[in-house]
Image (tube, rainbow, N blue to C red):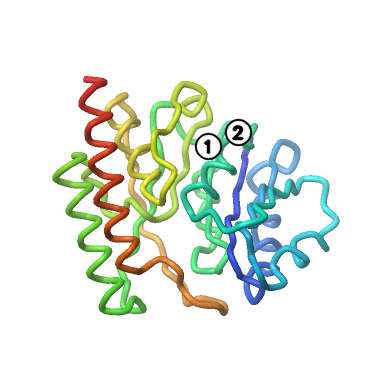
Amino acid sequence: MQSWSLIIFAYNEQDAIENVIKSSLRVLNRLNPEKSELIIVNDGSTDNTLKIIQDFDEKRIKVINHTKNRGIGEALLSGYKAAQYENICAIPGDGQFNPEELIPFAEFDDNTFISFYRTQKTRYTAFRKILSFFNKILNRYFLNIKIRDVNWVKIYKKQFFDHITPVLTSSLVESEICAKMIRSGYKIIEVQSTYHPRQGGVSKGASLKTIFLAIRETLKLYIALQKNE
C-alpha cells in the first residue's frame, strides 16, 4: 500500500472543519491505516477553527498554525513541506471537496499526478467567474498548462517536492508545481470532481487585488521557467 499525507488548509471554517477532518480520517483509514497522516494548516483563523482542530485527539493529526493569515499559497506550502509520505494531497477546509474521491487513486504510478476538475461552478459570483477565466488564460497561454482546473485538488508524489523549491508563495503556487511537473515529464490524469456547496462561511478568493497579484506572479513564474530552459 502506498503511504499518504492528506493536508487540510483552513481559514475561518468553523462551520465545516469538524466534518472535513472526520471524513478525511475515515478516508485515510481506507487508503493506508498504518502509514498516513493528516496535516491541518490553520491559516490565521479568527473564529473557532483552531479550537475545533485542537479538540481532536488523534495521533495522525499534525497541526500547523499560522498566527496571521498568510494566504492560500503559503498555507499550501506549509502543508507540502511538512508532508512525509509518498502521496500528497491538499484539500480545502470548507467541505467543497469530498475526500472519498481520493479512494480510487490509493495507488498510482510514480511518473504521474492526479488533477481533479470541476464541471459545475454556478455557485461562483460573476466576478469570481471572470477571475477564474482570466486565471485559465494566464495558465494556458503564458505557462502552457493545458489542465482543465489548475486551482482544484491534486495528488502529487512527494519525490517531486524533494527536487524543487517553489518560486511563488501566492495561490498560483499550484500553477508553478503543475508547470514544473509537466516540463519534467510527468503524465497528468484528469478526473471529474463534484463541487459541493460550502458548509458555512464565505469564499475568500476573489478580489481586484487577487487579479493584480495573479498577473504579477504569472509573469514572475514565466521568467523563472524561461531561465530554466
Measured Cα–Cα span from mark 1 to mark 2: 6 Å
Callout 1 secondary element: loop
Determine which of the numbered discs, if any, sits on residue 107 in the image: 1
153 up-or-down from 11: above or below: above
Q: Position of residue 37 (x, y in %)?
A: 70, 43
When asked about the image quadrant of residue 187, the answer is top left
Q: Are marks 1 and 2 in contact (CB under 8 Å)?
A: yes
Give the labeled residue for mark 2: 2
Number of marks in picture? 2
Residue drawn at the location 22% of the way across and 32% of the way down: 223
In this rendering, position of residue 143 left or right of residue 23 = left
Q: Which of the image's four quarters has the N terminus?
A: top right
Q: Amino acid at mark 2?
A: Gln
Residue 182, image quadrant: top left
The image position of residue 103, as x and y in percent, is 55, 51
Q: Position of residue 176 (x, y in %)?
A: 34, 38
